[in-house]
Image (cartoon, helix red, strand yellow):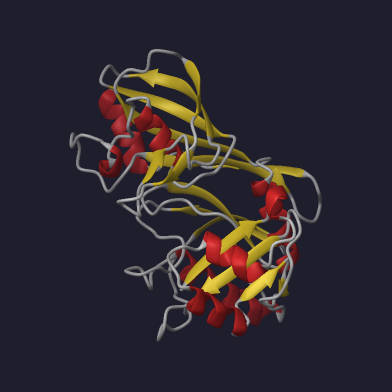
Amino acid sequence: MKKYIFVVEDNEDGERIDKYLVKNIAEHSRENIKKNIDKGNLFINGKVGKPSCTLKSLDSIEIDIYEVGETRTVPEDIPIDILYEDEDIIVVNKPQGMVVHPSPGHLSGTLLNALLYHAKKSSSKSGVTIKIGVVHRIDRDTSGILVIAKNSAAHCHLSKQFALHTINRKYHAIVHNDIANDIGKIDEPIAREVVDNMKRVVDYINGKNAVTHYKVLKRFGKFTYVECNLDTGRTHQIRVHMAHINHPLLGDDLYGSVHTHELQGQVLHAKVLGFIHPTTNEYVEFEKEVPEYFKKLLEEFE
């Protein structure tokens, strides 16, 4: 199963949901998408949607797509680092190496498996049914903060904030080479690469708007410790943008990192996440220091 989350943009207002999903989920057939809609796996603004539904700007869409013969995600007793939890949200610190939700090749051991177990355990104690909703994702080898919705209203509220790019997201990373400027802005559109489906590239014809701000925190000669702040949230955005300006992330083989250290993947950590709480309507912000392996690299470079 793979969960897809979208928020309808202004230019998509009035479009039928089935056509919208076929256009935006290229890796699944029209027939398989329809089967999953018919099974009740589609939610629009928290309510079950039908193929004939007409979309409106800023509608929140959530759909679980199951392959033929695939079973639903099962709860698994996996330890998770919960930074905060209330009746509407869970804020977690995802470790490097953990996939956010099941996908081909990663059907178990994911953050979603762990969250479903946590929700089931919490529901049995409180008597209140919790619906886990993954609002956003970070890559398997990126560590750091994620917010999870525990009900449809919270999911819709948070999804719209991500769509409007009002979420405060700060990442820490170590990149190759010495960056010339202490601060900078990368404003380059990103699209899926035609040949390699897993990879993204700067594409001035088919790409979607993507903006990354960076600030140098420390220089180590061959490497630079940076903070990146996102205006948008495209897949692999920091990885693509930093590689585009000749500063690929250390450990990021997909985007040109040289093998200089034994690493699990890119040295990237989602350190700060700030948003408007879906119930209190107050701004809340969470922060988590970089993981131990990241700290050891910084000490080594010192």
Q: Residue at x 53, y 68 (%)?
A: 115
Q: Residue at x 26, y 28 (%)?
A: 300
Q: Does residue 9 show up?
A: no
Residue 17 vs residue 275, the one in the foreground: 17
181 horizontally vs 154: left or right: left
Residue 20 vs residue 282, the one in the foreground: 20
Q: Position of residue 99 (x, y in %)?
A: 40, 60
The image quarter in which residue 177 lies: top left
89 horizontally vs 116: left or right: right
Q: Position of residue 66 (x, y in %)?
A: 47, 77
Q: Residue furthest right?
A: 280
Q: Position of residue 64 (x, y in %)?
A: 54, 72
Residue 160 vs residue 131, the one in the foreground: 160
246 horizontally vs 260: left or right: right
The quadrant of the picture occupied by the C terminus is top left
Please say if 177 is above or below 203.
Answer: above
Q: Position of residue 84 (x, y in %)?
A: 62, 54
Q: Residue at x 36, y 42 (%)?
A: 292
Q: Does residue 135 show up?
A: yes
Query: How many labels, in total?
Result: 0
Please say if 45 is above or below 141.
Answer: below
Q: Residue at x 46, y 65 (%)?
A: 101
Please say if 233 is above or below 99.
Answer: above
